[in-house]
Image (cartoon, helix red, strand yellow):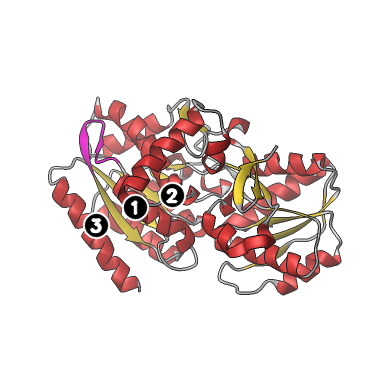
Amino acid sequence: MTIGFTRVCLVVACVLYGYAAHAEIKVGIVISATGPGSALGQPQLKTVAALPKEIGGEKVTYIILDDESDSTKGIQNARRLVIQDKVDVLVGSSLTPVTMPMLDVALESKTPLLSLAAATAIVQPLDDKRAWAFKVVPNDDLMASAILKYIAKSGAKTLGFIGVSDGYGEGYYKEVSRLAPTLGLTVTTHEVYARADTSVTGQALKVMSTNPDAVFIASAGTPAVLPQQALRERGYTGQIFQTHGVASEEFIKLGGATVEGAIFAGEAFTIAADLPAGDPFRHATEQFVTAYEAVNGQKPNMFAAHLWDVVALIGKAAPNALKTTKPGTPEFRAALRDELERGENVYLNNGLSNMSKTDHNGYDERSAFLIKVEGGKFRLAK
């Protein structure tokens, strides 16, 4: 399966090279197209064909590699892209554990890295390494704060926790355990499971044994279904909250009735149709959906939007960088990094982006929407 995918990647890259033989800007993309993170990486792979073929008046080449949801493979891919392919910017990975080692490559090569993963640790604390890293997915603390405030207002006093045993789950637990006491909430458990696990019955039973008013699940993609399914099938009737990592149709299809009523804080993309006509968030989503459907014949999900938004940010930053230097040089990579920090009021599928020298995520509470699974669809929570 991996060999077949590698061949596909090479074909995609060659086609794009053929189209842009004199391409100046090279974008290296590392995604988790296979392995446990494929639910995120596959939609991102399909997005590539919808991406703009020119940025700032220059042709752009996209070179796509699969990290197989493995951190070692991810860093190998990143090194190949900066050394062999001499890319101007790195994009990836889909997963936090794969992204973290790539930060070293970004620093060593002085190449901007725009991550598709979610954990706050990718961009905070903003040290020398993270000075080259940016993240398009809203930080854990922003979304955790929004959903925990909602949980507290709902009247819940105790909260069970189940999360994936990697940077995503632990990042959320860190924020939940920090914020909960300030809102009058007591976290009763800290249960974890691996993304590749096929059962979380034991963890669900341990959570239920503490009799929490509500349960918070910190997971992403289809693996997020397992804990909620286990809780419901064993009779838990309390409210269940998830994270923005569940915002895909696959989550609803796989979970069916067991995920009905799940509530999470997420991005505008997921509920764009519920926003007023003319809303700038809705416009950003409609632009992406139109481009994606034109090449794929189907609607995209939130994970696909991550890649689109990353390239949108590059598209905003590159024109000014091109005024002072040429792609393929250390000066261009540095200029591009500086321009990314200057991006203001950029409406994306993921939120309203305002990057700065001290904030490489760039979102505030205006980017967090309360979303509920209702009638088999994601709806804006009333």
Q: Determine contact: label 2, label 1, CB under 8 Å.
A: yes
Kindly report which numbered mark, 3 or 2, lies closer to the viewer in this rendering. Answer: 2
Q: Earlier in the sequence, mark 1 or mark 3?
A: 3
Q: Residue at x 43, y 49 (%)?
A: 299
Instruction: Check disc 2 and give the amino acid type.
Output: Pro
Quadrant occupied by the N terminus: bottom left
Which residues are the magenta region?
52-60
Q: Residue at x 23, y 30 (%)?
A: 325
The label on residue 296 is 1
> Is 300 a magenta residue?
no
Label 2 and label 1: CA atoms lie apart by 9 Å
The label on residue 12 is 3
Q: Earlier in the sequence, mark 3 or mark 2?
A: 3
Instruction: Check disc 1 and give the amino acid type.
Output: Asn
Residue 132 drawn above or below residue 29: above
In the picture provided, is 316 more to the left or to the right than 103? left
Task: Identify the image quadrant of residue 291.
Answer: top left
Q: Secondary structure under badge 2? A: loop
Residue 172 place in picture, x, y as percent: 65, 51
- Residue beneath disc 2: 300
Q: Residue at x 46, y 49 (%)?
A: 116
Quadrant occupied by the C terminus: top right
Q: Residue at x 80, y 63 (%)?
A: 236
Kindly report which numbered mark, 1 or 3, lies closer to the viewer in this rendering. Answer: 1
* Badge 3 density bin: few <14, some 14–19, many ≥20, Cα 10 Å: some
Residue 50 place in picture, x, y as percent: 32, 46
Residue 189 place in picture, x, y as percent: 79, 61
Label 1 and label 3: CA atoms lie apart by 15 Å
Residue 167 drawn above or below residue 226: above
Instruction: Check disc 3 and give the amino acid type.
Output: Val
- Judging depth in this view, the residue of 74 and 127 nearest the camera is 74
Residue 37 place in picture, x, y as percent: 48, 62
